[in-house]
Structure formats: C-alpha cells, structure tokens
Amino acid sequence: MSLALVHSRARVGVHAPEVRVEVHLSGGLPSTQIVGLPEAAVRESRERVRAALLCAQFEFPARRITINLAPADLPKDGGRFDLPIALGILAASGQIDRQALAEYEFIGELALTGELRGVDGVLPAALAAAQAGRRLIVPLANGAEAAIAGHVQAFTARTLLEVCAALNGTQQAPAAELAVAAVGARALPDMADVRGQPHARRALEIAAAGGHHLLLVGSPGCGKTLLASRLPGLLPDASEAEALETAAITSISGRGLDLARWRQRPYRAPHHTASAVALVGGGTHPRPGEISLAHNGVLFLDELPEWQRQTLEVLREPLESGLVTISRAARSVDFPARFQLVAAMNPCPCGWAGDGSGRCRCSGDSIRRYRSRISGPLLDRIDLHVEVPRLPPQALRSGNLGEDSASVRLRVVAARQRQLARGPLPNAQLDQPDTDRHCRLHNDDQLLLERAIEHLQLSARSMHRILRVARTIADLDDSVTIATRHLTEAIGYRKLDRALTAASAA
C-alpha cells in the first residue's frame, strides 16, 4: 500500500497540537497536492521537498501524490512540515521503512540542498512529544532548545540524509544537548547601588515578597528606573514549570530563546511609543506581546502618562486574569500573561511638582490633565503607590551602600515560602474567598480599614488589595496574624489614590 503516516506538531499559541502527515501515492498524471488547511508557506513546501529529495539522491515519485495534514480544521503555517512531508513521500514510495516512523515526531524546514533549518516553537513541540511518549527529531539549530524540555528523547540532524540514516539504523542520531556554557546566569543589578530611598526600598521588598504591582511617582532622576531594575534580583527563583512556561512563550515569539538565561525571570521594558498590539500581542498569525513575554517576570512601563491611553487600557483584564486572548477571524489564541507590573511616572508635565526647589510652574489644571491620562480603574489594580523623593547631593556622595539584594532576597524568599505553605499562590493572586480566609482582621482593625476606605474614597477592589498587601507585610514580619502596624503600612501605600483618581475623573 502506497500510504505513509508521519507525526509532527503545529503551533497554536503556546500549544503544539499533533498533526498527522498522511502521504498517499496513486496512479495518474504526476502531481503533488497538499490539503488540510495549509497556508502559503506550507503549500510552497512541495517545491522545497522535491528539490531536497533530488539533491539528496533520492527518487521523487512520478505519481499522483496527495498529502493530507490532519486535522483538517487546524490552520498550518511555516516551513516546519517540510521534513515530515519529505519522510512521508520516501516511506510511501518504499525508500525508507515506514514502520520506523511510528515512534518519532519530526519538525524542520528543508533547504533545497537537503539541509535542515531551524524553526520557531520547538520547545512547546518537545514538551508535547514527551507527553505523547514519542521521540523527537529536530534540526541541529533547535537541538539545545529541545533539550530544555528535559523528559523528551530529542535528537538532532543536519540534513535529510542523516535523518534517513538514523531511521534505517545505519547511523545513530546525536541526542539534543544543552551546552554547558548555556547554563550560566547573568548577574542582576544589586540593591546596594540604590542610595537612600528607604520608603521606596521597603515598597520594592513588599512587592517582591507578595508579587504586588507597583507605581513609582517622582521627579526626573530620582531613581525610579534604578529601583525598578532591581526588582528581578529580589524575586524568588522561578520553578522549573514557570521557567518552561516562560521559555515556551519566547520560543514561539520568533525573537530567539536565550539559552544562557532561560531559567531567569524575564524583565521587559518596552518604550512608551509601543502600540497596543506590541504590548498585548496580535498579528495575522497571533504572536505574544510584551505582557506575555514578561510572564512570570517583571513588566516595567516608564513614563506611564506618556503611553497612549487606549494602549494602557488593554492591561486591565490581563492584570486581573493573568491571561490575554487574541481573537482573529480564523482563530482565537490564549497567551499567558501573569506578570508583575512596575510603572513609573513624573508628578506633573515638567516633573517637579512637590519638589522643594520650587521649580514647578505647572498650573493645577495642567497637572490634573497630565494625571488624568491614567484611568482610575487601571490605578485601582496597582497595589502599591510610592512617592520617590529627590535626594540631596550629600546623600548621593555618601559612601554608605544600602542593603544588598542578597540580604533582602532572603527575607523575600522566606515570606514567599510562608505564602505557599498556605496555598499555591502568592498573596497578590489570591481571589476573594482566599483573601477573606487568610487576611482576617481584628474588629478594631476592621473599623480602621473601613474608615480609611471612606476617607480615601477607595473601591472594594482597593480594599481587597490593601488586605493582601497587609498579609504580605505580616509574612515579612513572620506574623501569623495581621497586626495594626501591618494594616496601617498597607493603607499608607494607597494615599496617592485620592489625588490620582480625582485627576482621572476630572
């Protein structure tokens, strides 16, 4: 029977659904037809495959060739199916053993010379192949990425001939390996470089311990960007599952996976001129945006009022759900987007409002218009609002270094472990029932919170966020219960709400 079946993987978001490449040879005029919802790059593969087979000294069958990519309702794009199509033609024509294909999955683009070229999205395919219990053969350029999956038996090849030799048993394909040099870690910026700013440093520690979103407000040059860049060095190490999830997003983005730092939490800092599509993702073939590339890491948005308001508004749902859905006519794709937001802004258009130098000449109306560029609902979703004052020159010249990141990180990790002992999520991700369960207050403290909510005119969402921040402060203090001092400190991080929200409503 002139029929062969080859297993491969498509790319749909961060998932890699199985694709069965079915090749049938029949009588009739010589032709090659690909069916199964192939897009342009897949339809063009018949020319690449024909040239590659002839260059590798194989016979291209002079028969009617039908190639079906099943399931038929799943769109297929890219050159990742070149290798399985070529192997299917060889197996259907009896040039290689079709039984040897059953335990493998294949991904790779073919050059006209028969060489294998790397493709995007190999890591999700490797993880899916491991779950299916099959081996995976990928181009040499993707070998290290496939090796990250760990539990998959992945092999590499340079050419189509090497793949065929491995299937025929005349040559052993080398196993995919992560180079020793690729397991190193980059030194992260240290908190010791930050002079003074005890209030902002404390807020950064709380944000790291509980995974809370943070807004830094201060004049130009006061250290907002410096502080934000220190947050990744305070965060606990990513678990293997988190690191693989983040690496899978980078793998499908087309930006290339940094194999030297794939275990580190990402830190993304897009420019304020970025579009909504660049931020959340999109395109004809949906690709992840900055918020997904920052998954399990930090997203830093500097000059927050300078962003287009419609761009910032798309952050609302991902900040709550940790997920972004990109809908197109042909498909709908979900991308993970559980990031920690750190935003920075000046207090006014000139940047000097509230500064002791008296340099600010902005009118009250211009300050309100400037701050109203950020909507109240978006501010409501940011847990910590912190003013960063300008330091005097003497403080900058001081040789006294602040506490280093390693020391702060010890407290952060201990607090995070206390949170994970109560449940699977950090405090910032608690839902309302878990917040009510783990963030109980004494009667007097409950009255204090209610008075603060009334005085600051805060929403119910803000109240729950205050409770979660107070719970994190108590965890840093190694306290089982939330004390009055923990609650008052948490309320203090919402004092900017009234001014900023009033400006947004003006």
Image (cartoon, rainbow, N blue to C red):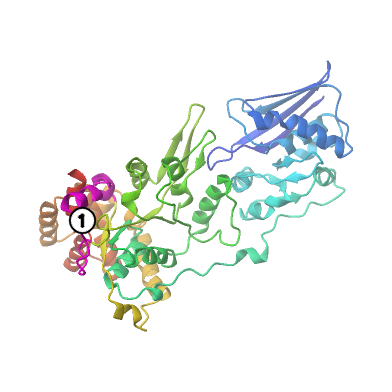
Residue at position x 48%, y 57% from top?
266
Magenta extent: 353-381
Q: Residues within 10 Å of mark 1 (few under 14, many from 20)?
A: some
Q: Quadrant of residue 309?
A: top left
Q: Position of residue 12 (x, y in %)?
A: 55, 37
Q: Quadrant of residue 275?
A: top left
Residue at position x 86%, y 27% from top?
61
Residue with the most extreme top position:
28
Of residues 62 and 347, which is closer to you in this image? 347
Residue at position x 87%, y 48% from top?
170
Residue with the most extreme bottom position:
399
Horizontal side, residue 261 vs residue 501: left or right: right
Q: Secondary structure at mark 1?
A: loop
Horizontal side, residue 457 vs residue 114: left or right: left
Above-or-below relation of 135 to 401: above
Q: Position of residue 470 (x, y in %)?
A: 24, 62
Q: Looking at the rendering, in which quadrant would you find the C terminus?
A: top left
Above-or-below relation of 382 to 506: below
Horizontal side, residue 307 vs residue 69: left or right: left
Q: Which residue is mark 1?
A: 362
